[in-house]
Amino acid sequence: MKNLGSKRKTNRTACIMAALFLLISIPILYGCGSEEPEEVVEETTATEETTAAPASDGEHLYDFSARVFDGDRFTEEDLGEKDLTIINVWSTDEWDSVNELWELAAIEEQLMDNVRLATYCADGNDNADRARDLLGQAGFQGTALYKAKKDLKAVIGTVEEYPTAFFFDSEGNQVSEPLVGVPDDTGQTYREKVNQCLGDMGKNMIGP
């Protein structure tokens, strides 16, 4: 009987020890398991950062779109149609830029086929009807833009004074410093600026 009691005590002790081992092991197992999801999240974040597209720098038009007042879209693919594209940024509540529209209309008609003069109305989202009316009164027949996205939106964001004109080649590179304000002789200034850009690119320039 004494031996039987001793065996029972031994078995009870063994059971208690096993239970204690399980109680200690379970938190350790769960703790180890919780580390794996954190490592997966970190790896995913790193992948997203390396594949993210670079932010627009306000100097190039590599990827963009804008609405044309006649309803079409204007994108980086349209730049490839011309050697040089001028984008004159104006606003309906800045009278210097509004008054310049009449001169821009005359300049646009005199440009060669390899040069495009486009206007971009900075407040066209809110004043589309007024912008259309002013462009119509001025007789501007060129590309009239508003609602820019991506790279063009970044370029417009650098404007500090209306009007400001930007000059881009067929690949979307800015090829000259912007023309800020209304020049004393708008026609002559634009002619010289266009010839400077075309000459730097090795293209035919505007004649006298």
Image: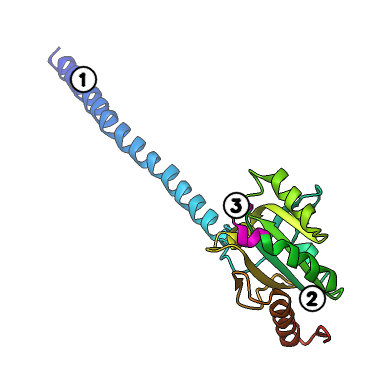
**Pointer 1 residue:** 12
User: Which residue carries the number 3 mark?
Assistant: 93
Indicate whether residue 97 is drawn in magenta: yes
* Residue position marked by numbered label 2 in the rendering: 83
C-alpha gap between disc 2 and disc 1: 93 Å
Badge 2 density bin: few <14, some 14–19, many ≥20, Cα 10 Å: some
Quadrant housing residue 202: bottom right
**Whole-percent x and y of residue 171?**
73, 72
Left or right? Give the position of 28 relative to 49.
left
* Position of residue 123 measured from the top left corner of the image (x, y, whole percent): 62, 50
What amino acid is found at the position of numbered circle 1 in the picture? Arg
Residue, x 72% and y 55% (percent of image)?
145
2 or 1: mark nearer the eye: 2
Could one spot residue 129 in this view of the protein? yes
Estimate how packed mark 3 is, as few (under 14), some (14 to 19) or many (20 or more) residues with alpha carbons within 10 Å. some
2 or 1: tag closer to the N-terminus:
1
Q: Which residues are magenta?
A: 92-98
Identify the mark nearer the N-term, 3 or 1: 1
Identity of the residue drawn at 66% across and 45% down: 127
- Numbered-mark total: 3
